[in-house]
Amino acid sequence: MTSVDLAQVPQRLATGAFILNSGLQKWSGDEETAAGLHGFASGTYPFLKDMDPPTFLKALSVGEMAVGATLLAPFVPGRLAGAALTGFSAGMLGLYLRTPGMHDGNLRPTQQGTPIAKDIWMLGIGVALVLGNGHRRAEKKAAKNAEKAVRKAEKRAAQAEAKVEKKAARLARD
């Protein structure tokens, strides 16, 4: 069982609950919602054009619920949850970057683009989860190596001390 890094809990709870809720809402979406979201997404990602809008909406819903559940599940490692969130938010930001009218020429969001531009925060959280506590591992490794070096030095010092005592005892006998 993977232990949860407490520093990740707020990030995972907030984004996981938000994305899970979004997926649950889309699950019961109507034909109009399906057509609108499908049209929007297929304009940016042409490979989606052949997909039926209701099927697209269900697939999007399942994907969001899976990402949300992954973030909320404490047994899922932070790096894996972060990878799922990073992929999801990168796809959303692709919509933002490629869809006309979402931003001005300098990437500042328009009113239409603001709801998607906020996904930059989810990308940041995803990357932070992927990076995890690598710095802690490096610190632990450095501490372990330092402890090993100290033990080695203490052993050498004890051996040197024993040699000196042995020579001193020999000299005292002679």
Image: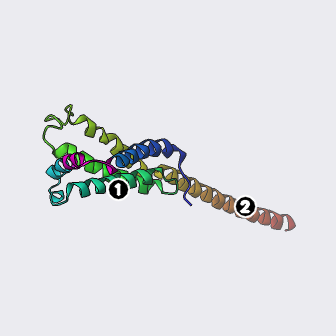
Residue, x 77% and y 65% (percent of image)?
A: 167
Alpha-carbon span between mark 1 and mark 2: 65 Å
| Display coloring | rainbow
Residue named by callout 2: 158
Query: Which residue type carries mark 2?
Result: Ala
| Residue 24, x across and y down, in percent | 37, 48
Residue, x 38% and y 52% (percent of image)?
A: 65
How busy is the neighbourhood of tag 1: few (under 14 within 10 Å), some, or many (20 plus)?
some
Q: Residue furthest right?
A: 173
Which dot marks residue 62?
A: 1
Q: Which region of the structure is painted magenta?
A: 26-37
Q: Nearer the viewer, residue 154 or 148?
A: 148
| Residue 160, x across and y down, in percent | 70, 62
Q: Residue furthest front?
A: 30
| Residue 5, x across and y down, in percent | 53, 49
Q: Nearer the viewer, residue 119 or 41?
A: 41
